[in-house]
Image (cartoon, rainbow, N blue to C red):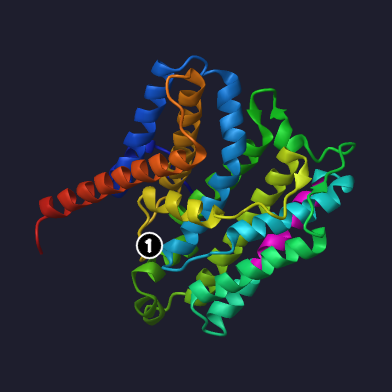
């Protein structure tokens, strides 16, 4: 049963000081955008922003679980591209068929990763690099290296193009449910505690009798399923399966996770802060686009990437300073 503080954001941040920087940066950028740009806080910009970034939120949360065990999943972008093609082919049967099929296809890649890492003892970097190449090649083969148009006569495009109760995009509603569910799993279940324990020390976790292999398999299946969901949103929102999409998505997911305060070595992580990290990355581009629209200064796509990288560097430095100050204040044992 959830306690009263389960969804108290202030309480959560106080227990996760490594995530302080991302929340400060996110709130600061939102205030900056609202004060500087007309229509920044308008319904159209908010819904468009959430709809597009829902893909990156869900793959980042899946990546967060993997990284908390000390692993990595380089395949998420290619899996999203592959599942977008699968979803597009199945779109004539409606979202109720295409969605679970594409998610299961993503989980299938997670199974391959889990078997490779757990049974074959292949390092996660190498194992997921292999599935990345396999998923990308598979997407190109089954699509003929062409975008695959969806069936506009079915309800498939509802997820990516329509709003629930005419308020929020269906994509962000579905992703929100997934994120909350995974947050509960991490915070309130034994498998969530095992995930964090593995990141601290897999050997110690085994000696403690924890089900290390089960938890490791779980995180890669979750990551694959999240990538599959991102592929459905991609196809539904753009009206076509995109075999050439997904390039660099794994890097964006890793950046969101790290900016959110999750340690790359594992053992420490936050689902809400990962969501904040993904929103922060998207918000940087959103603000740069508004700045270009003002006409006072123009940033090319290349310069936007440079500015985005510099901004992330500042956030990470601030995060490191917060953690360093906290360690300094803690009494030595």
- Give the residue at x 77% y 40%: 239
Of residue 7 and residue 113, the one placed in the foreground of this image is 113
Q: Is residue 171 left or right of residue 202?
A: right
Is residue 97 highlighted in magenta? yes
Q: Is residue 13 visible?
A: no
Mark 1, other Cα within 10 Å: few <14 / some 14–19 / many ≥20? many
Q: Is residue 239 left or right of residue 27?
A: right
Residue reaching furthest to the top? 38
Q: Is residue 309 visible?
A: yes
Q: Main secondary structure of the magenta part?
A: helix
Q: Is residue 91 above or below residue 299?
A: below
Region in magenta: 96-109
On the image, the x and y values in percent for residue 289 come to: 51, 29
Reading the image, the residue beneath label 1 is 264
Say which quarter of the image contains residue 131.
bottom right
Of residue 283 and residue 307, the one placed in the foreground of this image is 307
- Give the residue at x 78% y 50%: 147
On the image, the x and y values in percent for residue 333 come to: 10, 64
Say which quarter of the image contains residue 75.
bottom right
- Local secondary structure at mark 1: loop
Of residue 206 and residue 243, the one placed in the foreground of this image is 243
- Give the residue at x 51% y 58%: 63
Is residue 72 highlighted in magenta? no
Q: Is residue 139 above or below residue 304?
A: below
């Amino acid at each position: 049963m959830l306690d009263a503080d389960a969804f108290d954001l202030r309480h959560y941040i106080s227990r996760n000081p490594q995530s302080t920087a991302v929340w400060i940066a996110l709130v600061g950028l939102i205030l900056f955008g609202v004060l500087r740009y007309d229509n920044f806080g308008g319904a159209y910009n908010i819904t468009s922003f959430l709809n597009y970034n829902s893909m990156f939120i869900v793959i980042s949360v899946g990546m967060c679980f993997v990284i908390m065990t000390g692993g990595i999943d380089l395949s998420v972008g290619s899996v999203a591209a592959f599942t977008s093609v699968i979803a597009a082919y199945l779109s004539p049967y409606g979202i109720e068929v295409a969605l679970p099929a594409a998610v299961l296809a993503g989980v299938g890649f997670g199974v391959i990763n889990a078997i490779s890492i757990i049974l074959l003892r292949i390092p996660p970097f190498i194992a997921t690099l292999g599935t990345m190449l396999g998923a990308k090649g598979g997407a190109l083969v089954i699509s003929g290296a062409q975008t695959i148009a969806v069936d506009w006569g079915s309800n498939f495009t509802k997820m990516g193009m329509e709003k629930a109760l005419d308020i929020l995009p269906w994509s962000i509603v579905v992703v929100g449910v997934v994120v909350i569910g995974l947050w509960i799993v991490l915070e309130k279940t034994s498998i969530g505690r095992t995930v964090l324990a593995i990141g601290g020390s897999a050997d110690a976790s085994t000696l403690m009798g924890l089900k290390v292999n089960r938890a490791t398999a779980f995180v890669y299946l979750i990551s694959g399923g999240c990538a599959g969901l991102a592929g459905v949103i991609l196809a539904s929102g753009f009206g076509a399966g995109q075999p050439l999409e997904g390039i660099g998505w794994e890097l964006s997911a890793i950046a969101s996770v790290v900016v959110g305060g999750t340690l790359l070595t594992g053992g420490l992580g936050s689902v809400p802060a990962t969501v904040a990290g993904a929103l922060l990355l998207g918000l940087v581009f959103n603000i740069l686009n508004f700045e270009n629209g003002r006409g006072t200064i123009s940033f090319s796509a290349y310069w936007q990437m440079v500015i985005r990288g510099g901004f992330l560097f500042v956030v990470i430095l601030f995060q490191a300073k917060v953690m360093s100050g906290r360690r300094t204040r803690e009494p030595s044992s």
